[in-house]
Amino acid sequence: MSTLTDLPVIDFDAPDYRADPMRTLQRLAARYPLGRSKRGIEVFDYDLCRHTILHRAFGTGHPRLMDVLGLPESPALSYKRQSISFHNRGEERRRLRVPLTTLMGPEGSERFRTDIREVVRATLDDLPTDRPVDLIAELCDRIPSRVYCYWVGAPMEDAEFISRASHSVQQVHTRNPETAAEVVRSFADLRDFVDVQIERQRAALSDNLLSDLIRARDAGHLNDQDLRNWVVKLAEANTDNSSHQIAIAVIELASRPEIWAELGRDPALVPKALNEVMRYHPRSLSTSRETLEDVTLDGVDIPKGTAVFPNIGAAHWNPAYFPEPERFDIHRPEKPAHLNFGGGIFSCIGRFAVTIELEEVLGQMARRYPDLRVTRSGFSHSPMFTSVTDLEVVLGG
Ligand code: HEM
């Protein structure tokens, strides 16, 4: 039996993590199931990560995150308190999630595919093929924010606002109090935008996602406040994560010419390739939980109220579960599954929709641009996320 203080310490600001985070996590995961960091307990082992993500003794880490950030009393904090993120297991969480998991489950999301395909095609059509393109601004940010506009029936010109607002509000995960003022402002802007969209859709219901959410409200499954909060939440969670994951996928796949050519020839391989991207270089390097009671993990006693971080990056590079984790292999078996979208009652609501976005972007690009060259790229890795800081390509062809 060991104690919390015996656990190895990971310093996310140390040069080894900054220079090569995945190999740093791989080294730790190969030796230790658990560790600790400035933010709390880190879970490195894959099975223990799944346990922590799924088990009822672990609840949402969001309320603590708002404390760390020092979010002042404001409409932003009220929204956070009311939204799904603050709710632990129980009837209220289930009530809030069910309408969304129905509309955005595998089948519900599949009905977006034709329109997502069209958004991707039109966005690619606008890009020059003979000179360098800033792919983050011109594609990665545009696709999810345009898809959001299509979901809520907003004009495509609003996509830029959505993408900016999503990047701003996601700064809560930096745990940096200096971002609090901007987060408060951006949530207020988003809420005003959402109110306009709800009013407009209500006047002329159609077959888009927002109309379906309004119908769920009219059927009594959601109230007005839930409806507004969900439409804000979809903007909050959508663009930032999706944009970075699209950029990661372009870098990892297009920088490997044989794989890129294979995907161009055989689109059926795209879902497998994306699974490997999300295993090898996930956008989510961790998710967060807080212990709801005293628990014992791998023989270590952890008191109630402790912040615990299933370290998805470490779990994905653990050789006991993913042999030769540093090898990028699109033909890996499907199991064990990657944890990029968390799991269980807290799992990502948008995971099926964003997987379709990724499939459409990467499938169309590999077919249209067999000679695509990545001319500049850069990553940064926080304890929570992989971010793409720079991505310039020449599409060619
Ligand atoms: C590649 C892009 C994305 C990644 C990597 C991602 C990842 C995640 C992760 C790790 C969680 C926490 C899960 C857990 O702790 O078990 C989460 C939650 C969530 N995600 Fe995503 N996400 C992405 C895109 C989206 C999109 C496109 C949407 C909506 C359109 C979305 C909506 C949500 C919501 C609403 C939650 C909170 C669920 C809850 O608390 O019940 N995400 N996401």
Image: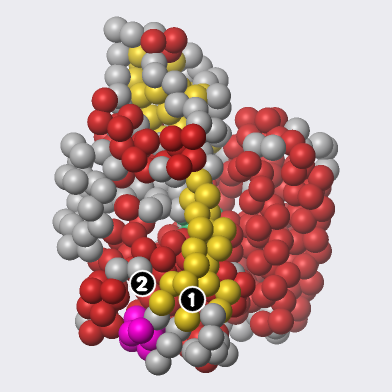
- Residue at the (35%, 13%) spot, across then down: 300
- Which image quarter holds the N terminus? top left
**Nearer to the camera, 328 or 348:** 328
Q: Is mark 2 within 8 Å of ligand 1?
A: no
Secondary structure mostly taken by the magenta-highlighted segment of the chain: helix
Instruction: Inspect the image, locate mark 1, and give the three-letter code of the amino acid beneath it.
Output: Val
- Residue 330: give x, y in percent of width and height: 22, 63
Q: Which residue is mark 1?
A: 393
- Residue at the (43%, 35%) spot, across then down: 16
Q: Is residue 374 above or below residue 245?
A: below
- Which image quarter holds the C terminus? bottom left
Q: Is residue 30 above or below residue 220?
A: above
The answer to the question of whether label 1 and label 2 lie on touching residues, with beta carbons closer than 8 A, is yes
- Residue 341: give x, y in percent of width and height: 42, 51
Q: How many neighbours does mark 1 have within 10 angstroms: few (below 14), some (14-19), or many (20 or more)?
A: many
Magenta region: which residues? 364-371
Q: Which residue is mark 2?
A: 254
Q: Is residue 97 magenta?
A: no
- Residue at the (34%, 81%) spot, across then down: 366
- Residue 379: give x, y in percent of width and height: 50, 54
Q: Is residue 7 left or right of residue 321?
A: right
Q: Which mark is residue 199?
A: none
